[in-house]
Image (spheres, rainbow, N blue to C red):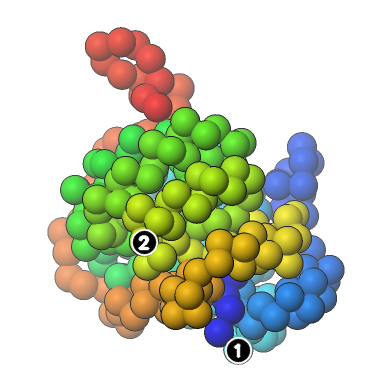
Amino acid sequence: MTIDCHCHAGKADGLTGPWDTDAPLDDYLVRAARAGIQQTVLFAAFHSDYAIANRSVARIVASRPERFHGFAFVHADRDRGRVRDLVRVAVERYGFVGIKAHRYDARISREICETARAWGLPVLYDPMGEVAIAELLAVEYPDVNFIFAHLGSFSDDWRAQKALIDPLTRYSNIYTDTSGVRRFDVLEEAVQRAGPHKVLFGSDGPWLHPGVELAKVLALGLSAEHQGWVLGGNLLRLFADRRTQPKPSPPVTTSRVNSPMEFRDPWSGEMPA
Ligand SMILES: [Zn+2]
């Protein structure tokens, strides 16, 4: 079973680039079918209201439930205090199986991690190169699985990608996806050092071609068993933890706003990297 763990879907309400305007699936689905991709994880494009965006992704998932899995997109800052409600609706009403967050919106928060823990959901997080957070997430939330998108950097920051390989190797709950990774040697090193059980195939469709992204994984030349893990087995394993009822837990922490502008290293004054 080949499953693309990273694909955007639906109309968005921005107008600055494809990422916040529209993620149409027509061409993606033809390309994915030709490449032999059988299932796809869908989540919204950047949006000013993820309650609306998640609902429109839910309609797409419901149109072909055997083909799609949904992740709930949340904004750590703007959705502060309502992440738990957004995720509850996404799980109970839409049948979603994960959470997506992006540093472009705001840094990942305790509220997101605690909500993921309560429901047993994986968190797909794009840190935009700030991979040091993997150290904190891994230790603070050892029972939550985090998938770092793009080996930590869509913008091809090889320093960040190399730096992610270390926590990927050391922590059992830190994973990565292959989407948009261009430096093949770094991807190969990640699989060799961290192991094929820590890497998930993703395309970043519909903006990247799922067949091209898949070819990259096939080019790793893994054994049939290990390739099967990367192409879908690892993701299905992460889905196995999910609960139909949230685990009883104290109220989620909503105090810290990880807005990129206000959160600097207190000693150097620099943005954490
Ligand atoms: Zn993406």
Q: Quadrant of the N terminus?
A: bottom right
Q: Residue at x 77, y 41 (%)?
A: 17
Position of 159 with respect to 145 (left or right) is right
Quadrant of residue 59 within the rendered picture: bottom right
Quadrant of residue 261 within the rendered picture: top left
Q: Quadrant of the C terminus?
A: top left
- The residue furthest bottom is 66
Residue where numbered disc 1 is placed: 66
The answer to whether residue 31 is seen in the rendering is yes
Q: Residue at x 57, y 75 (%)?
A: 3
- The residue furthest top is 268
Image location (x, y in percent) of residue 259: 43, 30
Mark 1: amino acid:
Glu
Q: CA distance from mark 2 to mark 1?
A: 29 Å
**Disc 2, ligand 1: is the CB inside 8 Å?**
no
Mark 2: amino acid:
Gly
Residue where numbered disc 2 is placed: 195
Image location (x, y in percent) of residue 219: 62, 63
Closest to the camera, between mark 2 and mark 1, is 2
- Secondary structure under badge 2? loop
Image location (x, y in percent) of residue 86: 45, 62
Viewer-closest of 250 and 145: 145
